[in-house]
Image: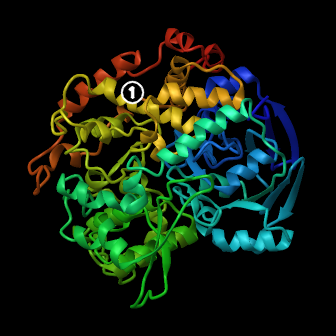
Amino acid sequence: MYSYFGKCLVIDLTTQRTQVEELSESLLSSYLGGVGLGTRLLLQKSTPGADPLSSENPLVFASSGLAGTMVPTASKHAVVTKSPLTGLVGDSLSSSHWSLALKRAGYDALIVTGMAPSWVCLFIDDDIVHFRKADHLLGKGSSQTEEAIRREAGDNRVRVASIGPGGERLVRYACISNDSNRQAGRTGTGAVMGSKRLKAIAIRGTRPISVWDLDGLQKVCTALYAKAQTSATEKYRILGTPGNVLVLNRLSALPTRNFQQASFEGAEGISGEHLAECYLAKVTACATCPIACEHLYRVKDGPYAGLEMMLDYESLFALGPLCGISSVPAILKAAELCDFYGIDTISTGGCIAWAMECFEKGLLTANDTHGLDLSFGNPDALVGMVESIGKRGGLGDLLAEGTRRASAQLKGGSEHWAIHSKGLELPGYDPRSMKTQALGFAVGLRGGCHNRSPSYEVDMSPGVDRLKAELGRGLLNKEKEDFAAVLDSLILCKFMRRCFGDFFAEASGLYTLATGINMSPADLKQVGERVNNLKKAFNIREGWTHADDWLPPRMFKDPIPSGEAKGAVLSEAELRMMIDDYYKARGWTAEGLIPLTKLKELGMEDVVELMKGY
């Protein structure tokens, strides 16, 4: 094989045994790698109905089929498991040198099963797997863990993926961090790793990676690298994703104070423009990335003077406007603590915002917060609650369960403002003023997600009335989901998408040049549909029902109070119409189930066998 190795390393933590399984060319070409391959292996290896935090739930790491080649932004991997936050498919992406190390160790995928009797660190040294004690690493953040492991190995080539104290304590939205500041976040993969008593996975990979047509690939990639330095990516290079703040604020789409408002009066002071002028220290990039969207900010004075932290739009929104916080230093400190504890910034901010509203409405009191004034806009409360969640102390223990479980326990009507879909806290796009994105959040296969259902792009397109729900949005959302699934399985960074003129034609050509596997544009496009049907099949097996495709009450009952979209609200009839339209576009039944004929049409006969009885 070219680009691929055709191998999957399976590690059983219970018995400390390993084996290498073959991955066929047909399987790899059907699911590419990343999220597609990871989900397919999860469906095969997991026990139906297993508790996500039990030994029966495998943790799958799947490399990009293009990782280790010269293809820009392909140094990525996916982590796929059953999410402890949603109970459905949990797929996350991360990038940089750990991704390359996994590939160079000779594996297209790694599956970790079982549960270690005591805390361990895996050290994969090409063909050799070491099981090392990890008790001395407990309580350390990812950077500290990486430093300790590399020091013990005496080799800076060793790359480390690890969990922080939040993952050790099974915070349901804990991340897996690698290369110090890259995270596989959102769906609680770090909690699954913690449940297995697996603190870290260190890899030293030394194998070369071959490609089918080196000269042809070099020619195409040279053009892509050049394109990535043009206006196609200027937004990300100049301001990073915080450049979204003022745009979404103007559109009344910037969720504020737990979605009570959709615009923030302090937006100017936390905008990408202000951050670049007053806080920017340097710009950095993932391995093999020509864009460099990550901006490192430095606090110059005050209690957090000297703090340096990277910040993207979603972290900024969740720890800022969503909690009514306008203090940049406090937002940076909260983000730093999220990184140390290894917990997802969006879910952390969503849980704190929910608790702040509960506090202001009297459902939580100073007795519950140990005297902390948990009001919107209090920067000390933000920082204090991040620490409480990471430690699972006091109220933080409840918030570590996520807003769905927390509101079910607290009750008192707090379900109305528990802003999630399928248990996953919503990201920074208000669905009341973006109707296609509302559909994407409702039907999202891993919960409300702008990365897996990036339909805000439809709402922001010329000629689309984003405040109007109408027939046809179902097909548009499906197309965005399938496109995202291809990117997440190849894996290519979504910020490269505008560097292609005809994406499916050019990307299929890239794949063929790298792997030698003939892939037509139509074949590649079908992979996206296949992967999303695969995820849906897993969810159906794990208990998904038609009622799960929905949004929280606030979206239907509380109109946006001010701004350009003042009065905008989503009606239940509108959402139901769009969901029905989406199911039809997907070729699913009126109840959202997949007909067997659909799976066979997509060449998924193997999945039909795995789904027997469901």
> Would you identify the image quadrant in which residue 332 lies?
bottom left
Q: In this view of the protein, which residue sits in the foreground, 250 or 398? A: 250
Q: Position of residue 535 (x, y in %)?
A: 53, 30
User: Image check: 242 left or right of 186?
Assistant: left
Look at 53% across and 56% down and name the residue there: 172
Look at 83% across and 68% down and name the residue there: 155
| Relative height, residue 483 to residue 233 (above, below) | above
Q: Position of residue 427 (x, y in %)?
A: 36, 52
Look at 85% across and 63% down and name the residue there: 132
* SS at circle 1: helix
What residue would you read off at disc 1? 479
Can residue 368 be seen here? The reply is no
| Relative height, residue 152 to residue 300 (above, below) | above
Q: Position of residue 68 (x, y in %)?
A: 71, 45
Three-letter code, disc 1: Glu
> Would you identify the image quadrant in which residue 482 lies?
top left
Q: Position of residue 361 (x, y in %)?
A: 22, 67
Look at 39% across and 27% down and name the residue there: 479
| Relative height, residue 358 to residue 509 (above, below) | below
Q: In this view of the protein, which residue sits in the foreground, 62 or 64? A: 64
Can residue 478 be seen here? The reply is yes
> Which image quarter is the C terminus in?
top right
